[in-house]
């Protein structure tokens, strides 16, 4: 962690304009595309990591850099008019905007759920070690945006938005156009179950002990994913679904079961089992089925680590790259750690002890 902090500080932080570059090479040479030189998403993860390091070893320089990053986002990324944060910025922090030449499949200039939920996560981590008044205001802002604007009434996240939070949707076009733009507009079951946890984590830190609305929406998100994106035979959450116009039921448009959605699913299912005693066994049964699926189809029992996709739908994952720019151990480690904390014998609650025996 200290080694990573040094690289963040010396090679990725922009000494001239502030903020973290999106991509650099090993020597610190910037290799980001000019139109996405800085992102809210990347700077959010920097805040998250720096806050964790300070919490672990008390290094005040890590906290200082996290604070500086928060203030940089406040100045350059935060939307004073419509709330939330702009995702793409030029190197000097200027907002990158869509033009007539921007392709329809590009997310340039849009606000998005992914940066929003990880800003929520980052601000939660930072507020835990630095209870600043402005930070609290932004943490609450992100919680309410994710809960009440980015999550729709069905219980899934809308993926992309215009700056004024108008959803980006291709639902009223033909199927070929929808599938062409699927990156911008689909139901992402993994993000839905992940967000259920991140909302509750933020709500708890803010002191909303009886936050019935957030809890109800979190449950709705997990239930929607189980009802529409769960493989009832083998277990596991599918990657993508879509509500096509004129069809009553959601249709799966990508049947792969990526590693990170399964990891987030473990944590979310166990969380729901803890909070809803009337349904705890149903959630816990799904948790056990998912763990069995992960052990059989995603964990590499020969070489270690997790395949990118479940071998039942993507057998080619067995020999594909096990790590790349978007695939590290973040999701599975965080999920397994939270699950262990709930299942250990010393955890409070008799039902948790009984579950461990099962």
Image (spheres, rainbow, N blue to C red):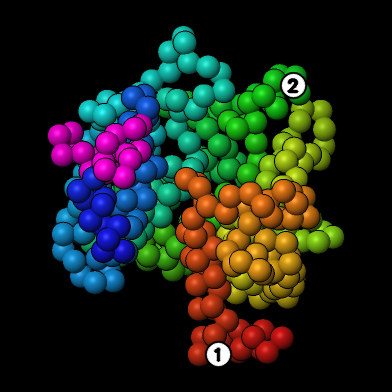
**The quadrant where residue 58 appears:** bottom left
* View extreme (right): residue: 233
Q: Is residue 73 above or below residue 195?
A: above
Viewer-proximal residue among 118 and 91: 91
In this picture, residue 146 sits left or right of residue 224: left
Residue for point 77% across, 41% down: 252
Within 10 Å of disc 2 (Cα), the crowding (few <14, some 14-19, many 20+) is few
| Position of residue 336 in the picture relative to residue 301 (left or right) | left
Q: Is residue 31 magenta?
A: yes
- Decide: few, some or many residues near mark 1? Use Cα within 10 Å; few <14, some 14-19, many ≥20: some
Residue labelled with disc 2:
176
Residue at point 22% right, 36% down? 75
Task: Please name the residue shown 74% across and 67% down the image.
Answer: 296
Q: Quadrant of the N terminus?
A: bottom left
**Magenta portion: prevailing SS class:** loop
Residue 154 showing in the rendered view = no
Q: Earlier in the sequence, mark 1 or mark 2?
A: 2
Q: Which mark is residue 345?
A: 1
- Identity of the residue drawn at 56% across and 18% down: 104
Indicate the quadrant containing the C terminus: top left, top right, bottom left or bottom right. Answer: bottom right
Q: Is residue 297 visible?
A: yes
Dot 1 lies on which element? loop
Is 348 placed above or below 216 here? below
48 or 351, nearer to the observer: 48
Is residue 353 placed above or below 76 in the rendered structure? Answer: below
Residue 189 is situated, as x and y percent measured from the top left of the image, at 65, 49
Look at the image and give the residue range highlighted in magenta. 12-32
Measured from the top left, where is residue 138 in percent x and y?
32, 47
In the rendered image, residue 179, in percent from the top left (x then y), is placed at 70, 27
Residue 349 sits inside the magenta stretch = no
Q: Looking at the image, which residue sits at the far top?
A: 100
């Amino acid at each position: 962690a200290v080694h990573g902090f040094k690289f963040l500080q010396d090679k990725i932080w922009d000494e001239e304009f502030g903020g973290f570059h999106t991509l650099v090479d090993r020597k610190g040479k910037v290799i980001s595309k000019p139109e996405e030189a800085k992102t809210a998403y990347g700077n959010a993860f920097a805040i998250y990591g720096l806050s964790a390091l300070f919490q672990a070893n008390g290094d005040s320089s890590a906290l200082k850099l996290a604070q500086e990053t928060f203030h940089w986002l406040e100045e350059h990324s935060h939307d004073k008019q419509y709330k939330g944060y702009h995702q793409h910025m030029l190197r000097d922090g200027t907002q990158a905007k869509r033009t007539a030449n921007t392709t329809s499949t590009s997310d340039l200039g849009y606000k998005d759920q992914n940066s929003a939920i990880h800003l929520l996560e980052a601000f939660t981590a930072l507020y835990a070690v630095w209870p600043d008044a402005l930070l609290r205001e932004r943490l609450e802002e992100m919680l309410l945006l994710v809960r009440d604007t980015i999550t729709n009434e069905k219980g899934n996240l809308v993926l992309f938005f215009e700056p004024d939070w108008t959803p980006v949707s291709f639902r009223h076009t033909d199927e070929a156009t929808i599938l062409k733009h699927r990156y911008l507009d689909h139901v992402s079951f993994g993000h839905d179950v992940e967000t259920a946890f991140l909302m509750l984590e933020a709500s708890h830190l803010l002191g909303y002990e009886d936050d019935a609305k957030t809890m109800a929406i979190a449950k709705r998100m997990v239930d929607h994913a189980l009802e529409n994106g769960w493989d009832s035979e083998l277990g596991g959450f599918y990657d993508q679904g879509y509500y096509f116009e004129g069809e009553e039921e959601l249709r799966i448009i990508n049947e792969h079961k990526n590693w990170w959605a399964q990891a987030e699913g473990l944590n979310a299912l166990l969380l729901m089992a803890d909070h809803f005693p009337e349904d705890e066994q149903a959630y816990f049964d799904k948790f056990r089925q998912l763990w069995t699926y992960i052990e059989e189809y995603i964990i590499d029992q020969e070489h270690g680590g997790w395949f990118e996709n479940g071998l039942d739908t993507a057998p080619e994952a067995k020999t594909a790259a096990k790590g790349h720019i978007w695939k590290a151990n973040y999701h599975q480690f965080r999920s397994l750690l939270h699950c262990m904390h709930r299942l250990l014998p010393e955890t409070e609650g008799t039902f948790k002890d009984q579950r461990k025996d099962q």
